[in-house]
Structures are given as structure tokens and as C-alpha cells.
Image: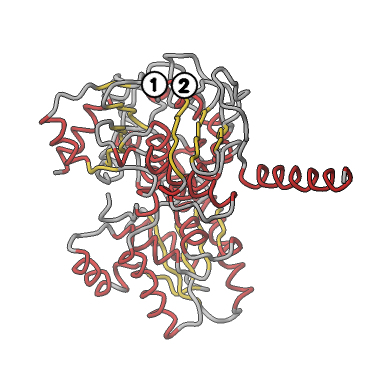
Amino acid sequence: MESVLDLTAARKYVGVIDAREFLKLLADQNLTVYEVPYDCCACPDTVWLTPPLEPVDEGAVSPLGITYRTVEGYLVPRDEEVISMGSVYFPHVEQASYLFTWGFNNVFRKVNSATKVVPYTKEIMEFGGRIRQRITENWHQFYCAHIRVGDSYFHRQRDEHLELVRRTLVGLALKASPGVKIPLLLLSDTDGKDYEAIVEPLREKFEVFRLGDQWAEEVARVRLLLGFNVDIMHLEATTCAHADHFVGNKFSTFSKRVRALRSKALKLPAESVSLV
Amino acid sequence: MGRHALVVFNVVFSLAILIQSLYHVTFMDTSPGSSPGGRHVLHFHGDGHTLGLTYVLGEAGLPLKFSGSLERYGAQDAIPGEILRQVELRMLQELVPSKSKSKFLLYTPTDGFGNQVTSLTVALKFAWLTRRTLVLPPLLGHYEGPARGNCRNLEVAGLTNQTEIRKGLPQSTSCLPDSLTTALFQCMTKS
């Protein structure tokens, strides 16, 4: 994980160990383990948006009912050498980070700030900057869009989402430079026919490209530099972070990560992101 | 004379209130039994050479007591607010698990990359709060990990992982697998 993500800021406050190192420890030492029970009350997805304000009953830690107060009262006193929590995908904790900082002192705020957005490593972040530089040698600006086709399964019809993205992008393009095509880096989890269906309505206003096709050499170079075959998704994310405008999917944590990288790591204005 | 004393008292009192509000610190007696009243407070006491601090986290009251000389923390020449800030920070740095590698917090990464990063940020906070070393799992592909923690809903649907959700093919009726086993399995299959 640390080959891709930069945990320097978080490490000031939290000790971390790679899972493989931990496996060795586990093999060498007879560590006691406590498994957090996951057998109680799951809540409907809508509840995720409402941070739980009341502590849950002792012994009944739900993935969706867990609160920092629960952590303090329930997990902190555990004596076992290992606490195994299973999934900790609790978006409400992030969404309700004010709960984490409210009433606490400066150190809590610092920990929150150091762990809120885990940036990419320097090499990966710099890749996005290099691509931006290359694009802007010939173009005045460039946009980036993340279209999640798989979204339709969970939340809404695909065509509805595509139309929203198209309308947003065209509106931006008309405002920025009417009559001139703008390069658009497209991130999508689809290929073939579906991809064409997405791109076609955008071609009138945009020069649409994909990172792996257009900048294959740069991608190969950074992989060589890193010494491993880094997933192109990370390179796309940093390139999108450097775009003049980013249009993403409001249900996607990936889109939200790009937004966070832009605001926290690159200090770009919030208006340069549209999540639709 | 009395008027001057009143002015001095007012100035000192105002400064104390200002420092307190700026640094979100509650100055109070740390005698046994004192209650934080449900707030997360930092108890502070000192005599100019030593400093004692007690953190009480939440109503559950987990006191983390600490004391040491100001000199030790390099804060002896700083202004009072700065002393607090520095000592606060260094005290917490001593309390975080990077200094004691004997206790660990393990979690299972789930879903795609964005969700895995969200999980990581939550896990980092939990590790800090529990003062444990966080075991970093490897980054998993979108459909390699188990489904997220609201397993009851998935269990009702008979679905346990992303691949099954996407395919819509109920293949298993079990809930999230034993988390440690899952995490270790994932580590081993990636290595």
C-alpha cells in the first residue's frame, strides 16, 4: 500500500506495519486476538448519512453503529494484542469528521487533518503534473471526467448519468472557449461499444482521450521509475487532479478522492470540481 | 491601590480565558474523582518546572496520565500557549503506538480503491484512538476483497462479495468471513 500512498503525515501520529511483516510476527509470537463481532443490526444505506450520536450497547459493535465513543469505551480497554475489525468502511465517520474534532483539542484536529486525505507518493503525484505540462504545451487547458457506468446498477440509469455529465461538460466548454475543442481525459470502467456510446456525444466539443492510449510512453516511464506495474487508475487520478476542471460521479469515492487531492494536495478552488 | 489590583486581576483573568478558548484546554484540578462532564478535556497543572497532563477521553473516562519537565520537551522558553501546544503534541507522540509495537489493529479492505482509501483513513483514526499499530493490508483489486461491512443486508440477498453482487448470482449465504482470517488470506494470496 505504501508503494502507492504517502503515509508520512499519518505516521507522525499512528504507527503502521506492513501486513507481510505482521504475518511474520504472528508466526513467531503467540499473539492473542480479539475479533470485533459483526453480527448485529446493520442499517439501511440512508442511515450512513446521519452520524450515529448515541453509543451502541456494550458488546454489540455494528459496522454502522460504531462511533468514536464506542472506540474509546469498547475497543481501547481490550487487552488482546491484536484487534481485528473486519471492514471499516464507514463513510459516515469521514462525513461526520466534525464529530471527531468537535470538543477535542488541537492534537485531535492535527490527527484528523493528517489522516483525512492520504496523498499519493511524490512520483505518482508528479506524473499528473508532467502530463498536464505536456497537454498545455499545445492546448490552453484540459478537462477530466470520471464516468462510472456500473453506477446504474445501484443508483440510477446509465443514460441519465451520461446526460448529466455531458451537459455539465458542454456548459463548461461553452463558457470557457466557445467554438474551440478542449482536450478531455475520460476515465470510465467500460470498453468497446459502451465506450463509443459515451464518447460520441462528447466529440463535438472535446478531443477525448484515454491516458493509456495517448500517453503510453509516459505511463511506461513512470512504471519503470517506480519499479512496479502501478495500476493506471492511480495515474489517471493524479492527472485528473491536475486538470483545469474535473467532472465526477457524486456516488463514487474515487471521484471524491480526486476532489480531495485537488483541494488538499494541490489547493485548487472547489469551483473547479463538479460532481454530478 | 485597590483599583490597580482590580485592573491587574481583570487582565490576568481575561488572558487566562483567552488562552483557554484558543487552545481548547480546560484548566482544572486533577484530584481523583473529578469528572470531565462528558467532554474530552485536557487536565493541565504545573509549577513552572514540571507539567502534568491527563487526557480524559469521553464519558467512559480513559485517563492517559503523563508528566514531565518542561525542559525535556524543549518548551521552557516558549509562551504558555506554545508550551501547551508543544507538550500536547509530544505527549501524544509518546502515547501513539509507534513507540510500542506490541499491540495491533487489523482491518479488512473492501470494495474498490476509493472505498479502500476511505477505510484506511478511518482505520488510521481508530488505530490512533486505540493506541495500536495499524496493520496495513495490500491494495486489492476491485473484486478481490469481500463486500463491505453491512453484511446483514447482503446476507439477506444471499450475496457476499462484489463479484456476486455484480453477477447477481447468490453463491453463498455466509456473512463477512472471519475478519482476521480474511485479512491474512488476502495478504497471503497477494504475496
Given the image, on which type of amino acid does mark 2 rest?
Gly
Instruction: Name the residue type under label 1.
Output: Pro
The kind of secondary structure element at disc 2 is: helix
The residue that label 1 is drawn on is A77
The spot of residue A215 in percent (x, y) is 30, 73
In this rendered view, identify the residue nearer to me: B28 or A168.
Answer: B28
Residue A167, relative to residue A220: is it above or below?
above
Quadrant hosting residue A234: bottom left
Q: In the rendering, which numbered label is found on residue A73? A: 2
The residue under the point 45% across, 50% down is A114
Residue B35 visible within the image: yes
Give me the chain letter of mark 2: A
Work out whether residue A1 or residue B116 is closer to the camera in this orientation and state it.
Answer: A1
Q: Residues within 10 Å of mark 1 (few under 14, many from 20)?
A: few
Q: Are marks 2 and 1 in contact (CB under 8 Å)?
A: yes
Query: Which residue is drawn at the image coordinates 39% and 33% (left, top)?
Result: A88
On the rendered structure, is A145 left or right of B142? Answer: right
As drawn, B26 above or below A54: below
